[in-house]
Amino acid sequence: MTYVVTDNCIACKYTDCVEVCPVDCFYEGENALVIHPDECIDCGVCEPECPADAIRPDTEPDMEQWVEFNRKYSELWPVIYTKKEPLPEAEERDGEKDKLGKYFSEAPGEGG
């Protein structure tokens, strides 16, 4: 099992999760985070820290697409291990459906 970030993170990018990750397996895009599925040690400490409920175990239904999404972007974006402020529109976008097609940016974040 591994944990993955789903579209609930897009346009919010809360980073509470990165601060508790013992192996620094989060990667930062311009407006989202991902987890490298091969680096995640399945400890689960990140899941309850996410205010947007965007982190899910890959054992839930229909998570295959998110495993591949997380794998792809974790190999393109810089690692993030420091908590940062969420995006300005985070509260407004939190809980919104279908954010992948509306807001997702492939651009990398700053990392760090």
Image (spheres, rainbow, N blue to C red):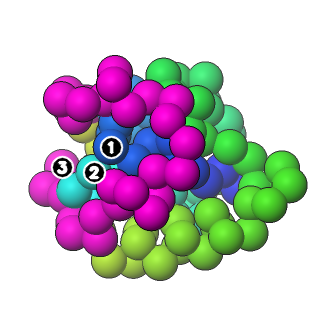
**Residue 29's image quarter?**
bottom left
Q: Is residue 79 left or right of residue 101?
A: left
First in sequence: mark 1 vs mark 2: 1
At label 1, the amino acid type is Ala
* Residue 78 locus on image (x, y percent): 25, 64
User: Which residue in the protein does label 2 denote?
Assistant: 31
* Relative horizontal placement of residue 33, taking residue 44 as reference (left or right): left
Q: Nearer the viewer, residue 103 or 70?
A: 103
| Residue 49: percent from left, percent from top | 52, 23
Reply yes or no: does residue 85 show up in magenta: yes
| Residues rendered magenta in the picture | 83-112
Give the label, 3 or 2, closer to the camera: 2
Find residue 112 and name its label.
3
Instruction: Sort mark 3 into few (<14), some (14-19) or many (20+) by Cα contacts within 10 Å.
Output: few
- Which residue is more in the foreground, 47 or 24? 47
Q: Is residue 65 left or right of residue 23?
A: right
Helix or strand or loop: what does disc 2 sit on? loop
Q: CB atoms at circles 3 and 2 under 8 Å apart? A: no
